[in-house]
Image (cartoon, rainbow, N blue to C red):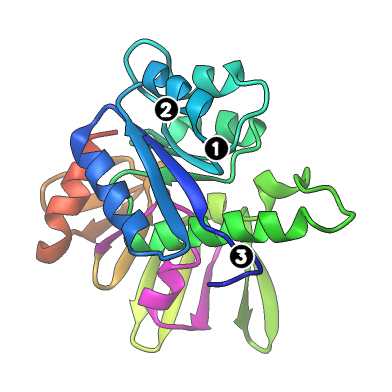
Amino acid sequence: MDKGIDRKIRCLVVDDEPLAIRLLENHIQQFPQLELVASSWNAIEAFDVLKKEAIDLIFLDIQMPGLSGIDFLKSLNNPPAVIFTTAYREYAVESYELDVIDYLLKPVTMDRFFRSINKYLDRQTSSSTPTAPHSPSTPTEEDHIFVNTNRKYVKILFDEVTYVESLKDYVRIHTTEQSITTKDKISEFEKKLPDYFLRVHRSFIVNTGKISAYTAHDIEIGEKEIPIGISYKQVVMNYLQGR
């Protein structure tokens, strides 16, 4: 994980949910390169911390009582790097406009947290070069993927994917226009997808934006019914009912 930063990354967690704070604190403690300076329950407390402490990176909840995370960030003249955390993906576009490092959906998994830290480190490394540290292309860098099929690489737009199906050592990617099969394990392919994709079964990943209906047992995407696996049921229900 070392990408040329030779000192501790001083972190601040801002969230009004105790469980969310505890989870982020636990994730931060897993990385020797990160130092948790403080955790704040609201934007006012966070502002006081910033006046007293040098902070490199803020994990900032969007929906908080009083001042929202977005309004708090806009109020700062020279803010540290920010990773937004929220249970609501509809804020994604506005968060990108604010040039934040990343946008994490709760509950934040360790794998997704790790990817965010790497994004932060990549930006810090690139900022030491003559190129602009905040590339205008950042918001769209993850809007697609190229997959190898029939000896050529085909561009797949994430927004057009409806669901992904496991076929042992292959995955079949179903889009609004076509279905494409590529050699990959579904667990590995899942890591390449944005946060709005949800694993609902050991053999299925769905684009949550394409869900038309759901029950306790399956998810409907148009005419397609996709089963919810027993071991995935609680996570799926928490996600869908918390939207």
Q: Which residue is mark 2?
A: 62
Task: Tell me which label, 1 or 3, sits earlier in the chain.
Answer: 3
Q: Is residue 145 left or right of residue 190?
A: right
Based on the displayed image, in which of its 4 quarters is residue 42 positioned?
top left
**Closer to the observer: label 2 or label 3?**
3
Q: Nearer the viewer, residue 54 or 159?
A: 54
Q: CA distance from mark 1 to mark 3?
A: 16 Å
The tag earlier along the polypeptide, 1 or 2, is 1
| Residue bearing mark 3 | 6
Q: Position of residue 7 (x, y in %)?
A: 57, 60
Q: Nearer the viewer, residue 49 or 240?
A: 49
Most distant residue in the right direction = 130
Q: Which residues are magenta?
A: 177-200
Q: Secondary structure at mark 1?
A: loop
Q: Is residue 175 above or below residue 147?
A: above
The residue singled out by tag 1 in the image is 54
Q: Is residue 179 magenta?
A: yes
In the visual, does 86 lie left or right of 72?
left
Marks 1 & 2, CB-CB < 8 Å contact: no
Q: Circle 2 — which element? A: loop
In this rendering, the label closer to the viewer, 1 or 2: 1
Residue 185 location (% of width, % of height): 40, 82
Q: Quadrant of residue 113?
A: bottom left
The relative height of residue 201 versus residue 195 in the rendered view (above or below) is below
Q: Of helix, strand and loop, which one carries label 3?
A: loop
Which residue type does callout 3 highlight? Asp
